[in-house]
Image (cartoon, rainbow, N blue to C red):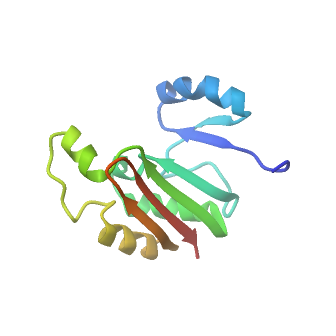
Amino acid sequence: GRDGAVIAADLTPEMLAQARPQAAAARAALVLADARKLPFADASADALFAAGLINHLPDPEAGLGELARVTRTGGLLVLFHPSGRAALAARHGRTLTQDEPLSAGPLQRSTTATGWRLAAYDDAVDHFFALAVRC
């Protein structure tokens, strides 16, 4: 909306450099930040979009907790990847297991434990999508 802002955060300057042209076109701010310790106030975000984030966190539950900290009650968290978990595992030469952070059971448990309600889960061949609502 007119009063809102879009902020893109990443841990690496290289990824922010790649995002700079799109961020400028979208009038989005770029912030160098660790998703486990975000430089934002409590309950300051209405929605978060995390593309490919959870599998890169050493402690996914701690990361989800930090995302919950900065999201207002009723706010949304979209977890997305442009390929499904099976395709991603195959591309990296590994076998998909049911105990991975983005498997349905573990993701349900970790979102619940960190203040989210998992509202949608879709692990398709060509994408991964989960939607959680901040409790």
In the image, residue 55 above or below residue 72: above
Residue 74, position as x, y percentages in the image = 65, 71
Viewer-nearest residue: 41 or 98: 98
Viewer-nearest residue: 38 or 71: 71
Residue farthest to the right? 2
Viewer-nearest residue: 55 or 31: 55
Q: Residue sitting at 63 percent across and 62 percent down?
A: 71
**Image quarter for residue 96?**
bottom left
**Image quarter for residue 30?**
top right
Residue 45, position as x, y percentages in the image = 67, 57
Residue 97, position as x, y percentages in the image = 18, 60
Q: Is residue 14 left or right of residue 134?
A: left
Q: Is residue 15 left or right of residue 74?
A: left
Quadrant where the C terminus is found in the figure: bottom right
In the image, residue 95 above or below residue 12: below
In the image, residue 15 above or below residue 119: above
Residue 25, position as x, y percentages in the image = 70, 28
Q: Residue sitting at 61 percent across and 37 percent down?
A: 31
Number of labels in the image equals 0
Q: Is residue 78 left or right of residue 29?
A: left
Residue farthest to the front? 125
Q: Residue sitting at 33 percent across and 68 percent down?
A: 104
